[in-house]
Image: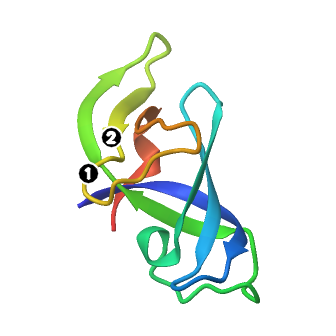
Amino acid sequence: MPSVVIQITRFVDESFPGFVECKLIDAKGETHIFIDKVPVVSLDALWSSSAYPCAGNIRCTVETEFKDESGRTLVRIDTEYPDHVESTSGDTHFVVASLQIEDR
């Protein structure tokens, strides 16, 4: 399943299984913030004592791939499926550089 690369910036809540704040920078350079469970964004056993920032991923659906006017390959993704992940502003659709997409 494809996933978008994110940066896990800090630990925010020790409630099981632990919650972290994450950052996604889209193709326009805009920052989107997520707060979600550790197992949703990382395969590592992160906790409040872990070193931050660190790399993570959000699984997503690739909706379309296209080139912008400068020739960059961009991808429109939806983070709603399969893990119901949305940004703190309620967004689930983002346009990112194709290099930000990998298989998790």
Figure check: 66 above or below 7:
above
- Mark 1 crowdedness (10 Å alpha carbons): few <14, some 14-19, many ≥20: few
| In the image: residue 37, left or right of residue 15 | left
Dot 2 falls on a residue whose secondary structure is strand
**Residue that protrudes farthest toward the front in the picture:** 15
Where does the image place residue 87, in percent across and percent down from the top left? Answer: 53, 44
Q: Residue at x 32, y 51 (%)?
A: 60
Residue pointed to by mark 1: 81
Where does the image place residue 37, in percent across and percent down from the top left? Answer: 50, 71
Quarter of the figure that contains the N terminus: bottom left
Whether pointer 2 and pointer 1 mark residues with C-beta atoms closer than 8 Å, the reply is yes
Return the residue nearer the eye: 103 or 89: 89
- The part of the image, by quadrant, that contains residue 12 is bottom right
Residue pointed to by mark 2: 78
Q: What amino acid type is highlighted by mark number 2? A: Asp
Figure check: 46 above or below 57:
below
